[in-house]
Image: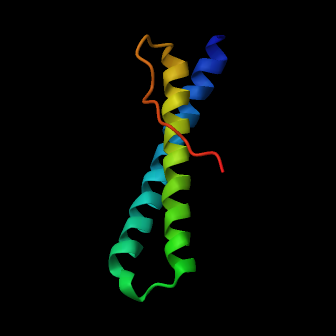
Amino acid sequence: MQEEEKLFLRHASHELRTPIAILASNVELMDRLTDRSQRSEEQSASFLRQYRALDDVQLLIETLLWINRQSAQLPKSESIDCI
């Protein structure tokens, strides 16, 4: 991998971590501040989709960092349910 690509991956992955962390914190805060028993199925499904999307993006960022490091330690693996 060329040095420019490594530099790009390092900067891109680190720059994405802050907004993703902010989004994750805000989704969790909204989740905690709302009454779960009063949510409709659509609202509950929306929270679930947001949590899953944030997890996907966080795993993608970890993968980018791993590729950049070319580390012998593999990133965390996870099974996915393909619907």
Give the image quarter of residue 75. Answer: top left
Which residue: 36% across, 71% down? 29
Q: Is 33 left, or right, of 47 in this rendering?
A: left
Can you say whether 57 is above or below 23 in the image? above
Which residue: 46% across, 84% down? 39
Q: How many labels does the image show?
A: 0
Where is residue 20? Give x, y as percent. Answer: 49, 52
Screen quadrant of the N terminus: top right
Q: Is 3 left, or right, of 47 in this rendering?
A: right
Where is residue 25? Give x, y as percent. Answer: 39, 61
Give the image quarter of residue 57. Answer: top right
Where is residue 48? Give x, y as percent. Answer: 50, 64
Q: Is 35 left, or right, of 52 in this rendering?
A: left
The residue positioned farthest toward the left in the image shown = 32
Can you say whether 61 is above or below 34 in the image? above
Query: Which color mode does the image show?
Result: rainbow
The residue positioned farthest toward the bottom in the image shown = 38
User: Camera-side residue: 32 or 42?
Assistant: 42
Q: Is residue 13 visible?
A: yes
Q: Can residue 34 be seen in this view?
A: no
Where is residue 27? Give x, y as percent. Answer: 44, 67
